[in-house]
Image (spheres, rainbow, N blue to C red):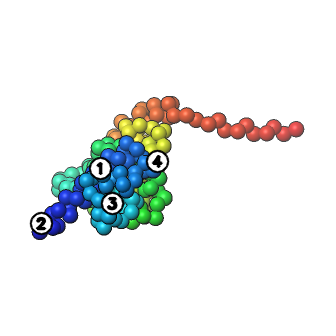
Amino acid sequence: MGLLDEHKSERRARILAAARRHVARHGYDGLTMRDLAQAARVSVPTLYNLFGGKDAILTAALAESVERVAALHVPADTTYFGRALLGFDAGMTMIADAPDFYRRLIPLFMTSPEARPIRMRTELGFLALMTANLTAARDAGQLAEWAEPRVVAGHMFAQYMAAFLHWGVGEVDLDGFRTLALSGICHLLLGVARGRFAEEVAARARELTPRVAALADTRPTQEAPHARSAD
C-alpha cells in the first residue's frame, strides 16, 4: 500500500470511528456532516469524496462490522451446533461492543435505501455461513434429509432479527435479546436436528427455558378484547 492509500485508509477509519461515537451519543438525526468533519479532523468535502452522504458513511460503518463477523475463524473440530454458536456469539459481541450505536441505527438499517446493500450483505452473509453449516450437518446425518438448509437458515435469521427489534425498541436488555434470539433458534432447530446436533440444541434450549419464562413475566402484555356477549 502506498503512502497516499495509507493516508486515505487512516482518514476513513478515523471518520467511521467518529461517526460511531457521535451516533451513539446523539442519534442518527443528531449527526451532521459539519460536526462529523470536525470530530474526525477532516473537511466536509473530504467526507463526501471518501464516502458520500451521511447514510453512506453509516452504512460503511455497519459494513465494516459485518465483515469482521464474516471473517470468523472456526476450528475444524467444532460441532455443528458449536459452529452456529460461534457465528451467533460473534454477532452478539459486535453489538455488545457498541450497543448505543446499533440501537440508534435501527431506523436507518431497516428503512433507508442507502442501507439496503448492507441489509442484503448482512442477511446473505448470515445465510451463507448457516447454510454451509447446515448442509454439512445434513451430509453427516445430523439434519433431517427433507430439511432444506437455506430455508432453515432463513428462519434462523428471522428469529434473530425479531429479537433484535425487541431489543432495539427497549422491550428487553442485551441479555434478554441474546436469550430470546438463541432460544428461538434452538426451538426452530429442534424440528430438524438429529444425533449429536439435536442433543446439543435440546440441552441449550432446556437451559434457556427458565430465562425465557422470566422475560415473559416481566414484559408488558396487552389484554385481549372481550368478546361481545350475544343478546
The residue carrying mark 4 is 165
Q: Is residue 187 visible in this depiction of the protein?
A: no
At 29% from the left and 63% from the top, the residue drawn is 46
Residue 180, numbered label: none
Disc 1: which residue: 39
- Pick the residue in front: 32 or 68: 32
> x, y percentage for residue 97?
29, 43
Please identify the quadrant where the N terminus is shown.
bottom left
**x%, y% of residue 58?**
36, 57
Give the amino acid type for the residue marked by disc 1 in the picture: Ala
| Along the viewing direction, whichever of 129 and 230 lies nearer the viewer | 129
Q: What residue does disc 3 label?
A: 44
Mark 1: give few (<14), some (14-19) or many (20+) Cα within 10 Å.
some
Mark closest to the chain's N terminus, 4 or 3: 3
User: How much space separates mark 2 and mark 1, taking CA atoms?
Assistant: 23 Å
Could you say which quadrant of the image residue 179 lies in? Answer: top left
User: Label 2, label 4: how many angstroms apart (C-alpha)?
Assistant: 43 Å
User: Which residue is the site of mark 2?
Assistant: 3
**Cβ atoms under marks 2 and 1 closer than 8 Å:** no
Contact flag, marks 4 and 3 (Cβ < 8 Å): no
Q: Secondary structure at mark 4?
A: helix
Quick one: quadrant of the C terminus? top right
Q: Earlier in the sequence, mark 3 or mark 1?
A: 1
- Amino acid type indicated by mark 4: Leu
